[in-house]
């Protein structure tokens, strides 16, 4: 088992709260994580039809077998359990009683906010991080292979061909999860929508354009995006509010959480294809942004990432907020650094009146160096630098 960075925070929350909930996409390793962290706890998966039927028909009787605490997997499938869990934890007064997992954010969070608010520590587990693979010496041989393979644990555990695994993952996601979470009848149209979103990763979201390209309304596009967000397929990066007397773009940027899934949806069928693929830049940018998010989530922290862009087209790929301190980060997929690579950072330095010490350039080469315009970080060094950046 590859050790997960988040396990330390998970143990900490279990001595602070009676309930700890771990959310994240399917197959991100939630079950393995909680079982490994709490080996002595009883376990029940609400994905099992018999167990789910018992929990749905007789929640009090179901929980009577777990009065001493348990791991309840995919607990959002039995929503009536939450009120009964509240009663049990209030009566017990013990911390770390129940460990809950769920693959859909708003299904689980809605129930927690209704019944378990103030009693629950919350964590988000995404697939492996670059840092986790780096510590185990499991980084693929090239940047292209890393981006193409993605980070889902089963691919590494079973040495599976990425394209085959992602094809099955998408089919399972559509057939099982989308039907459960939203009454979407035309799954083929939803899959086209998913692929259209892939073509927009790293771009500013235009719901009207996205809907028109998929033959759906603006409101339907918004609703389907919420499904992808709830299932941890995509996330929206919000623009930073500080304007420096500029008119700013107010729409968010769309990103995928995993570059392997993104590559599959873009029709990229090999790592070598990424060397010259027209979407190499957006895939690399998606990778950097998702790794920054993992660095926050794995420490139990909320996202502190934004982008900045004005109506004249001046842009900084990522603004990282540390209280009243801001850091700027530019992302370039090329292996060569040119003066033009620092264009965004130079502009940011000018309008924010900040020096290069809080500016970073992440690029597709391997050499890291300090320059007056900012700190240059090659992709192989990125794993070590993330804690310093975020």
Image: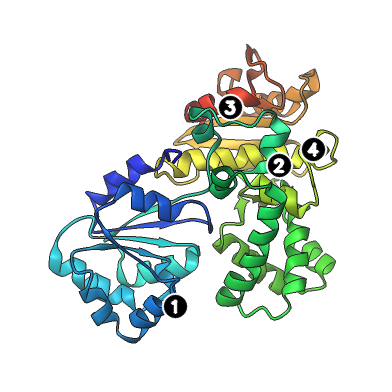
Determine whether label 3 and label 1 are within 8 Å by CB. Answer: no
Mark number displayed over residue 49: 1
Name the residue located 70 percent from the left edge and 23 percent from the top edge.
346
Determine whether label 2 and label 4 are within 8 Å by CB. Answer: yes
Determine the secondary structure under disc 4. helix
Name the residue located 57 percent from the left edge and 42 percent from the top edge.
156
Q: Depth check: 338 or 164 in front?
A: 164
* Residue occupied by mark 2: 148
Name the residue located 27 percent from the left edge and 78 percent from the top edge.
62
Determine the secondary structure under disc 1. helix
First reached walking from the N terminus: tag 2 or tag 4: 2
Question: How far across and how far down the image is residue 214, in percent?
Answer: 81, 68
Crowding around mark 2 (Cα neighbors within 10 Å: few <14, some 14 to 19, many 20+) is many
In 3D space, how far apart are the residues under numbered discs 2 and 1 (Cα atoms)? 35 Å
Determine whether label 3 and label 4 are within 8 Å by CB. Answer: no
* 314 relative to 24, above or below: above
* Residue occupied by mark 4: 274
Determine the secondary structure under disc 3. helix
* Residue occupied by mark 3: 382
Quadrant for the N terminus in the image: top left
Is residue 250 visible from the viewing direction of this image? no
């Amino acid at each position: 088992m590859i050790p997960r960075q988040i396990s330390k925070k998970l143990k900490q929350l279990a001595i602070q709260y009676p309930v700890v909930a771990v959310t994240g996409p399917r197959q991100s390793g939630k079950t393995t994580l909680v079982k490994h962290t709490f080996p002595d706890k009883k376990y029940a998966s609400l994905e099992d039809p018999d167990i789910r039927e018992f929990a749905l028909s007789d929640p009090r009787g179901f929980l009577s077998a777990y009065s001493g605490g348990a791991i309840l997997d995919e607990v959002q499938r039995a929503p009536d359990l939450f009120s009964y869990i509240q009663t049990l934890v209030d009566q017990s007064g013990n911390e770390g009683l129940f460990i809950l997992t769920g693959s859909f954010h708003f299904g689980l969070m809605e129930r927690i906010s209704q019944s378990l608010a103030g009693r629950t520590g919350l964590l988000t587990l995404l697939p492996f991080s670059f840092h986790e693979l780096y510590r185990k010496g499991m980084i693929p041989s090239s940047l292209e292979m890393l981006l193409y393979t993605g980070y889902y644990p089963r691919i590494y555990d079973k040495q599976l061909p990425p394209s085959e695994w992602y094809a099955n993952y998408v089919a399972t996601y559509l057939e099982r999860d989308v039907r459960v979470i939203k009454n979407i009848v035309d799954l083929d149209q939803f899959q086209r929508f998913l692929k259209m979103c892939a073509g927009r990763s790293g771009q500013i979201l235009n719901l009207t354009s996205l809907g028109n390209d998929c033959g759906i309304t603006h409101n339907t596009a918004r609703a389907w995006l919420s499904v992808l967000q709830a299932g941890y397929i995509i996330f929206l990066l919000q623009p930073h509010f500080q304007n420096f007397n500029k008119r700013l773009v107010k729409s968010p940027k769309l990103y995928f959480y995993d570059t392997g899934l993104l590559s599959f949806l873009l029709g990229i069928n090999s790592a070598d294809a990424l060397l010259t693929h027209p979407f190499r830049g957006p895939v690399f940018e998606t990778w950097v942004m998702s790794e920054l998010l993992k660095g926050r989530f794995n420490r139990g922290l909320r996202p502190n990432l934004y982008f900045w862009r004005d109506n004249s087209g001046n842009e900084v790929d990522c603004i990282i907020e540390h209280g009243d301190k801001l850091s700027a980060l530019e992302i370039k997929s090329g292996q060569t650094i040119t003066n033009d690579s620092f264009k965004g950072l130079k502009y940011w330095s000018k309008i924010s009146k900040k020096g290069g010490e809080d500016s970073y350039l992440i690029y597709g080469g391997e050499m890291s160096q300090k320059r007056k315009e900012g700190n240059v970080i090659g992709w192989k060094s990125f794993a070590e630098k993330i804690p310093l950046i975020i």
